[in-house]
Image: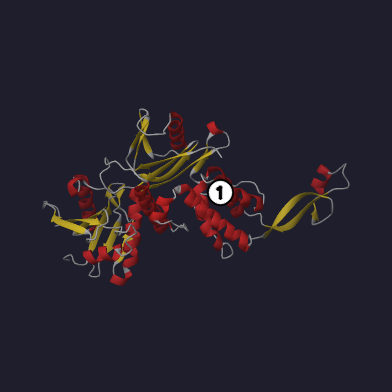
Amino acid sequence: MATTMTLVAYEHQTLRLGDTPGLREAHLTALLALQERHAARWFMPLRQGIKLTSYVGVMQVPGLTLEILPKLDDPHRARTGDAEAAHWQHVLLRLLKATHQLPVTVPSAAALAQARHSMLDVFIAAFLTQVETLLRQGLKKQYRPVEGNQRVLRGRLLFAQQLRHNLVHAEQFYTRAHTYDATHPLHALLRQALHVASAVATSEQLATRARSMLGQWPEMPPVAVPTELPVLTHATARYRPALELALLLLQRHSPAPQAGRTTAVALLFDMNRLFESYVAQQVRRAAPALHCRVAAQASQYLWHDVAVRPDIVVTLPGGATVVLDTKWKVPTSQRPSAADLQQLLAYCHLWGAAHGLLVYPTNPSPHPSRSTQQPYAPGRLAIAVQGHVLFADILLPDGRLNLDFGRQLLSYLMTLPQ
């Protein structure tokens, strides 16, 4: 296996040649080519470098594995040491597992600090475990029609094809028969993902596991990779965990022409969307017990055919509506920006809400989530609107996700005057 350097960076960080140890021009060229092939905006090109954006996860190109981790503090603060990287890697994997419902076993932050794991390898290991489970249970088989020459007459003889192919080969029979085997489109997808896993795994042990499973997997031609999980039946429902991880690998990888058979992969996630999904999930989970209703991603027209949508709309037990907008950033001096406040005010007017809440993340502390509230300046056409800012502890002091966050947020909303 070719030597691959692992580089750990944080969102919004700038990586430049000469300033970033181990980063070479060939790495930058491959990263830029990978982004262009996916028509993505994972980072901004700079002169002899790139500036990362809000995307986190892992990218791998020939010779380089780039891990991009989230942060909750000053973007200019220097970060060093495996312990801090392991902490944020653990947090990111926990968020991905919670929001994407992926069957990923997340090592503890202490275990990650003691033995560095590539995040890519964490996903590959989870995928291989699911594939091993399917092999152990036995792959689904089905009947399928097969046409071709046979030495023995079995099935239906196709006379036109027999005359075309076997006019001078009377010992062969061109037939159509049904065979019972494991050839199935789902198995083709999993086989393609096994090929990717064997090529991009940074661990030789994982690559060997993937190659071993390929040897046990039925041969079949590749199929088009779908954009969404295929519809599963009762008989194929057990394939869901393996297919979810397979699509994660297949949809975000591409060949690297300059490296022959080597492949490149980018398992990246927008932290803004990830934070929004986590808040919505926690609030939705806590809502029934508190007799609240939650709507996520509901949109309304702001002007003509221009639609806007807040992240979350909560209806309290008394019928009052509160609009929530999540922001994955640490605002300067703990004050919301004018743009954030203007956006929230527009949402409140469109949804007829007297209260709007901006939800920012904060570093975990032994203290409860902090909040402030101020009324918007009155306008001639405006209803009275209170703007609230909540700095939410989505993490506990020990680094675990705060699974009581949804109840805490809704409990705060229920104290608001209606």
Could you tell me residue 86's position as x and y percent?
Answer: 38, 50
Vertical order, 80 against 190 (above or below): above
Could you tell me residue 8's position as x and y percent?
Answer: 39, 42
Q: Is residue 31 visible?
A: yes
The C terminus sits in image quarter: bottom left
Picture residue at 53% right of the left edge, 49% below the top: 226
Q: Nearer the viewer, residue 50 or 81?
A: 81
Picture residue at 31% right of the left edge, 43% below the top: 79
Q: Which residue is mark 1?
A: 205
SS type, badge 1: helix
- Is 409 on the left or on the right of 1, as rendered? left
Farthest residue to the front: give it: 114
Could you tell me residue 382's position as x and y percent?
Answer: 14, 53
Could you tell me residue 169's position as x and y percent?
Answer: 87, 44
Q: Nearer the viewer, residue 417 or 10?
A: 10
Pointer 1: residues within 10 angstroms few (<14), some, or many (20+)?
few
- Is 326 on the left or on the right of 240, as rendered? left
Q: Nearer the viewer, residue 311 or 372?
A: 372
Vertical order, 357 against 70 (above or below): below
Give the quadrant of residue 396: bottom left
Number of numbered discs overlaid on the protein picture: 1
Vertical order, 255 against 190 (above or below): above
Q: Amino acid at mark 1?
A: Gln
- Is 382 on the left or on the right of 278, as rendered? left
- Picture colour scheme: secondary structure
The N terminus sits in image quarter: top right
Q: Is residue 386 visible?
A: no
Vertical order, 57 against 404 (above or below): above
